[in-house]
Image (spheres, coloured by chain):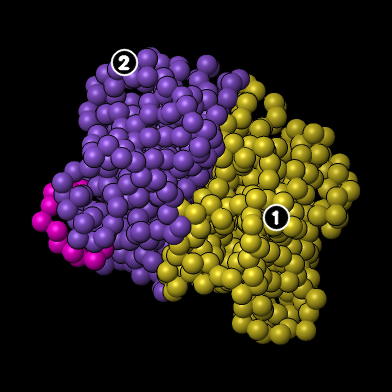
Chain colours: A yellow, B purple
Amino acid sequence: MKNEDFNCPVPFNDSDCVLMAHGGGGRMTHRLISDIFYPAFRNPLLEQDHDGCVFPVQEGRMAYSTDSFVVDPIFFPGGDIGDLAVNGTVNDLACCGARPLYLTAGFILEEGLPLSDLQRIVRSMRKAADKAGVQIVAGDTKVVERGKCDKLFINTSGIGVVPEGIRIAPDRVRPGDVVICSGPIGAHGITILSARESLGFETNLKSDTVSLNNMLSQLLKNIEEVHVLRDPTRGGVSGTLNEIAKAARVEIVLDEASLPIPDAVKGASEILGLDPLYIANEGLVLVILPETRSQEALAVMKSFPEGKNATIIGRITGEDNAIVKMKTPYGNYRIVDMLSGEQLPRIC
Amino acid sequence: MKNEDFNCPVPFNDSDCVLMAHGGGGRMTHRLISDIFYPAFRNPLLEQDHDGCVFPVQEGRMAYSTDSFVVDPIFFPGGDIGDLAVNGTVNDLACCGARPLYLTAGFILEEGLPLSDLQRIVRSMRKAADKAGVQIVAGDTKVVERGKCDKLFINTSGIGVVPEGIRIAPDRVRPGDVVICSGPIGAHGITILSARESLGFETNLKSDTVSLNNMLSQLLKNIEEVHVLRDPTRGGVSGTLNEIAKAARVEIVLDEASLPIPDAVKGASEILGLDPLYIANEGLVLVILPETRSQEALAVMKSFPEGKNATIIGRITGEDNAIVKMKTPYGNYRIVDMLSGEQLPRIC
């Protein structure tokens, strides 16, 4: 990218860092915007260059969501805090049944962060936004003193349009529904932990961060009867299913033998004393819908790379126990509860 | 507020603090939500209890904005980081000509933050939201280790509806327009600095943080010809007017004698070597409109407490110099430039 294309007379050097002055609202702030943010995010709405952006809307329903990202480390196998921040909010909107349209991005930067790191991250955000078909239309940057944040934190918010006829809500969950899991469980959390602690597991594991909206949009186009969509991020598959069980007052029974847990995740989890069901995922979705439509749903999901390993992992029983149970390979059952705290801090 | 109303069996104690586990997505996270966030923000959209909220929209135009808040200290005379975060985004939307509707709130909490401080802040957010007539409809909370952030950071994003006929944009600014300033300049920045450094100025200064949307909505209802609305936060009146002058390619001439700078701000600024024109304000708006409508605009603004000291501080000349000049009381002129960095870090 040529800086001179963007009204930036002097390109910054690799050794340049974020300074407190970059957060002051003066020339240095404008420089950061014109050198780094605008070249990466460039679109007509952002370039309205006001305190916010204005766009036309049609009558209908919109979804609105927000998420902050504090993942440590900021770069990791499979992604970085930038694409994670875009995919996270895109997926939250998609799990509301919406077609995501626009995102905002709020950056909190630590004084001393290399500008080259920031540039790499915003480019990664743009790439993720393009893949998901969304635009970053408004932003904000603050700078805090060295030691008052950890490299950078990113907040994204997003809005999208919910197509007519779609209603995703836990209270639609019914006995006879099944739970489809879109892919392998646990890769993101183990990858982050391994990268953070330099554990050096000899694995090919990488974060599963990916936007799910294209697959989910197709799924909803084919099957309006989808009852719940939820991405099992913090709290993992278990935390997410417990939330749904409680909200819907149903019993969910998982089949342990069917859980798609990669050997690398199993191995690392055993060594570290973690349970993969509580590990955060960033490219996974749980789909709950009537069993009668499940084969059709699996076919749609498998036609996308992010759903190629989709599989049924459980079903809703007739009991209104508001719990999640697991059927073990030996045929007995155990309760899968919600954790009190967390296994892994700062995984997203 | 009775905690038991909100499905919270054991109220938290004054000595309770934010723990890493509050950010884990498990029971402790749900507890934080049910004890602190829901009781304060409570509304049907938030209580959809999903990854985002869904609401109906009418055909038209919407405004969308985001802002992160890292102010230090988090409590200061006249407000706290909570009402600042609500008012800031409400004002950004109002300055797009929009009627703000919904906000999201993303919290990044430092391990060890007293829960009583968090509760005080979210209640202050609710109060500010009620005053502005907006609802906080989606949120997110992350926790980072002690020393990895500074007490708490808050991101708010917001959306609003832009009424038909309203078009706020710098390119509408014309020679013959005047600049109205809604009130006294510099109170917020000096208040924050004084509170942070315990300077103990013997002043009654307090932050001017307030939502401006009710006043601006009335102004636009009466006068569609308003060309620009902008709140002079970071970068101050000077930074904001320089941005407008550059975007509109016009010359703006301020009349120094007319600038509403309180004596307390003048005095503190002299001692500290600061220029009030570069100091951040959080409850001030600059209105640019044709001089022919200025008396009517002043009358509307003066009918609101937040605009009772509104006054004309400058005018747009016929020159396309893209600069801001100041006419001194001695009749000569000086350039009012944009600062490179900032005078005061972390004022919002």
Is residue A314 shown left or right of residue B286? right
Image mark for residue B296: 2
Q: Main secondary structure of the magenta part?
A: loop
Side of B145 relative to A203 (left or right): left
Image spot of residue B342 (x, y percent):
40, 58
| Image position, residue B143 (x, y; %) | 46, 64
* Residue A182 drawn above or below residue A95: below
Q: Chain of mark 2?
A: B
Quarter occupied by residue A325: bottom right
Q: Residues within 10 Å of mark 2 (few under 14, many from 20)?
A: some
Q: Nearer the viewer, residue B191 or A209?
A: B191
Quarter of the figure with residue A267: bottom right
Camera-side residue of A118 and A309: A118
Q: Secondary structure at mark 2?
A: helix
The segment highlighted magenta reads: B196-207
- Residue A4's disc number: 1
Q: Amino acid at mark 2?
A: Glu
